[in-house]
Image (cartoon, rainbow, N blue to C red):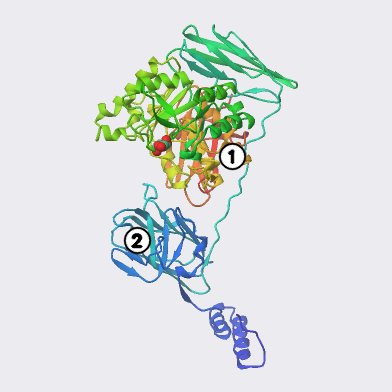
């Protein structure tokens, strides 16, 4: 509280003198000294334990922020030493504090809490107004604590962050022990994290007809074909095609192409779509040969939403929603059942589905009747990851059964095969996949083959060789920034191994309602993180498998999944995966070549505060004037020379297409 000025005491005298001296001398120093002596200290200097601030404003990757305790609610211990006070948290952790330029010094002792033993690895950071003031380097469980002492003069906003040291957040129990903020005056105040609004950027599709999707489709001759022409626009709509290859027919109302390709060859089919208000044309290239998945598969998979609780009803509902939501009109095709459909085998060794999937043939017929395709899951080992019947020593029988049931896609997940061949060498890693590919080739159906073994033995170097159409490059994704960003941005360097028919797979999407069980909840990724996720997966030519409950698609999630200009990057027929072309701290630029000669460029901000990011023409291999188009907003930004710059929000992206001016 400031003192009230009254002119009836000695204080009044001091004040008058001070002001008078300032007036006469025109020099403020002596006057100021006297003035402050007169007014007395406005507020006292003081030191505040971090645990006394409002810790509920801290955000962290797991558990709750704790005062004077570890995240697991034990006393704070680092390397055998106990601390009475401090803030126990878990990577990735951010805690913002307002100092209003009144801070003096921040001190603390930091480390991984002893409750995780030798596990856990973190990096502590003290950031003032966007500048890193102190960084711990990687600290692991059992490492000695590090002392922090940072000058805070002039800092308005302090950020205390704990990163996961690049290896995901498991066991990252982090302690800011004995942490204190010394203030010259006033109090430090915890800042409530800003809740990002979920802003829809994708414009509504036009009511006029438009044909979307890849514009290329590959299939093996001799086996059933199903391809639904993805088209937006008001219904009813009539779709026609000229020069369809022999053996195929088109239903003009549904846009479904079906039949059996008779001959090998490349067919340029002219598609036409017409409704009450307009018409459009587009060429579809049908390649009848040995390759399918000429563009990355797009669809849905049951795992990230329902996990082992998946039922036939969930799968039917997902197919229904794929059509009712209009996603099918943007190229979404597969409805894939993950683990937990299997029972045992019959007397002849044939695989059986469990009681949740009483009639597989009826289910595949249902999904096909909607113009969609359907996928299934198994393991080369005796058991799947969730402990159900795997395909070990039954590969041919199983491939035959999948084909007879009518499945179009197989995810083949290593898991218990590790028990059959512990420490498998290169040949050992390839073998089970070669075996199943050979079995699928014998089966009377065109089945996309998805390898799942988490990247072992640099699978990207040989996944195509064993006939994989895609291969998981990483462990399982979860709906956290740490998981998604490490997996996504960790794909740098894999770009040379992907191409039409064979794709790197950084795992399924975690937008919408997920939960790995019957209990689903909204993805924990922020809106900007979700834009980053979809933009990056499109740039990476990753298979796009929606991992959410399709019956709970909200407007924001639909906006993420229906932007044709963004999806086109993923489905571009050239099939070039993006690579990282520039990196400056937490700011990254990724780019990929497109069939029409333009470039798709993602400007990503992995940092904690909005920042300007520049993509230069020299890094992109361009010169002169270039047109830049914002793909999420589907709007031209103008013509730029030498570079393009955008201000990108925390964990967000600016996704553009750069093309030569005519
Ligand atoms: C593994 C895979 C997941 C999922 C589960 C099923 O963890 O990586 O994608 O298929 O198995 O049990």
Q: Percent from the top left, x then y, of residue 156?
A: 52, 63
Most extreme residue toward the bottom is: 9
Is label 2 in a helix, a strand or a loop? loop
Most extreme residue toward the front is: 347
Q: Percent from the top left, x then y, of residue 255?
A: 62, 18
Question: In this rendering, does residue 465 appear at all?
Answer: no
**290 versus 328 height, above or below:** above
Is label 1 in a helix, a strand or a loop? helix
| Residue 150 quadrant | bottom left
Residue at the disc numbered 1: 557
State the residue at coordinates (25%, 35%).
422
In the image, which disc is placed on residue 467? none
State the residue at coordinates (65%, 23%).
210
Please tell me which residue lies in front, 349 or 248. Answer: 349
State the residue at coordinates (24%, 31%).
425
Q: Percent from the top left, x then y, of residue 539?
A: 48, 32
What is the C-alpha distance between the residues marked 2 and 1?
38 Å
**488 versus 54 height, above or below:** above
Q: Quadrant of the C terminus?
A: top right
- Quick one: label 2, few (<14), some, or many (20+) residues within 10 Å? many
Please tell me which residue lies in front, 80 or 215. Answer: 80
Residue at the disc numbered 2: 113
Q: Percent from the top left, x then y, of residue 494?
A: 38, 32
**498 versus 583 height, above or below:** above
């Amino acid at each position: 509280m400031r003192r009230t000025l009254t002119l009836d005491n000695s204080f009044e005298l001091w004040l008058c003198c001070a002001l008078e001296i300032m007036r006469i001398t025109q020099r403020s120093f002596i006057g100021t000294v006297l003035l402050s002596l007169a007014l007395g200290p406005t507020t006292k200097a003081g030191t505040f334990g971090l645990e006394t601030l409002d810790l509920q404003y801290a955000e962290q990757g797991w558990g709750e922020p704790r005062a004077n305790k570890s995240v697991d609610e034990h006393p704070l211990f680092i390397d055998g030493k106990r601390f009475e006070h401090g803030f126990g948290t878990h990577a990735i952790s951010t805690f913002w504090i307002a100092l209003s330029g009144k801070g003096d010094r921040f001190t603390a002792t930091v480390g991984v809490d002893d409750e995780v033993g030798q596990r856990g690895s973190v990096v502590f950071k003290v950031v003032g107004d966007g500048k890193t003031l102190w960084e711990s380097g990687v600290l692991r469980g059992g490492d000695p604590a590090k002392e922090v002492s940072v000058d805070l003069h002039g800092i308005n906003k302090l950020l205390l962050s704990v990163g996961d040291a690049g290896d995901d957040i498991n066991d990252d129990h982090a302690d800011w022990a004995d942490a204190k903020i010394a203030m010259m005056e006033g109090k430090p105040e915890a800042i409530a994290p800003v809740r990002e609004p979920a802003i829809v950027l994708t414009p509504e599709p036009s009511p006029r007809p438009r044909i979307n999707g890849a514009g290329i489709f590959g299939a093996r001759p001799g086996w059933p074909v199903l391809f639904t022409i993805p088209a937006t626009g008001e219904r009813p709509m009539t779709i026609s095609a000229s020069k369809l290859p022999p053996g195929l027919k088109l239903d003009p109302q549904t846009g479904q192409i079906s039949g059996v390709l008779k001959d090998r060859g490349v067919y340029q089919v002219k598609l036409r779509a017409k409704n009450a208000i307009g018409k459009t044309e587009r060429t579809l290239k049908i390649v009848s040969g040995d390759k399918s998945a000429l563009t990355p598969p797009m669809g849905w998979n049951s795992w990230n939403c329902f996990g082992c609780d998946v039922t036939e009803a969930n799968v039917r509902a997902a197919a229904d929603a794929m059509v009712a939501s209009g996603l099918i009109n943007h190229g979404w095709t597969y409805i894939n059942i993950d683990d937990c459909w299997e029972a045992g085998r019959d007397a002849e060794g044939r695989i059986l589905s469990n009681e949740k999937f009483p009639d597989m043939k009826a289910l595949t017929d249902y999904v096909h009747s909607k113009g969609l395709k359907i996928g299934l899951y198994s393991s080369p080992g005796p058991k799947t990851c969730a402990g159900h019947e795997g395909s070990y020593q039954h590969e041919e029988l199983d491939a035959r059964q999948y084909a007879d049931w009518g499945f179009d896609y197989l995810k083949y997940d290593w898991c218990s095969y590790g028990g059959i061949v512990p420490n498998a060498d290169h040949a050992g890693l390839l073998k089970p996949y070669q075996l199943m590919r050979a079995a699928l080739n014998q089966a009377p159906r065109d089945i996309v083959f998805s390898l799942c073994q988490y990247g072992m033995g640099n699978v990207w170097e040989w996944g195509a060789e064993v006939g994989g159409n895609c291969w998981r490059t990483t462990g399982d994704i979860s709906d956290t920034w740490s998981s998604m960003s490490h997996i996504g941005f960790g794909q740098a360097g894999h770009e040379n191994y992907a191409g039409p028919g064979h794709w790197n797979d950084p795992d399924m999407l975690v937008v919408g309602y997920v939960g790995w069980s019957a209990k689903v909840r909204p993805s924990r990724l922020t809106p900007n993180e979700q834009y980053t996720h979809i933009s990056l997966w499109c740039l990476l030519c990753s298979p796009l498998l929606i991992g959410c409950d399709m019956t709970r698609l909200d407007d924001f999630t639909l906006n993420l999944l229906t932007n044709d200009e963004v999806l086109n990057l993923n489905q571009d027929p050239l099939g070039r995966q993006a690579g990282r072309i520039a990196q400056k701290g937490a700011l990254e630029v990724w780019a990929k070549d497109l069939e029409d000669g333009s470039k798709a460029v993602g400007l990503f901000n992995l940092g904690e505060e909005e920042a300007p990011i520049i993509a230069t023409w020299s890094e992109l291999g361009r010169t002169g004037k270039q047109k830049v188009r914002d793909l999420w907003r589907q709007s031209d930004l103008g013509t730029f020379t030498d570079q393009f710059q955008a201000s990108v929000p925390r964990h967000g992206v600016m996704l553009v297409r750069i093309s030569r001016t005519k």
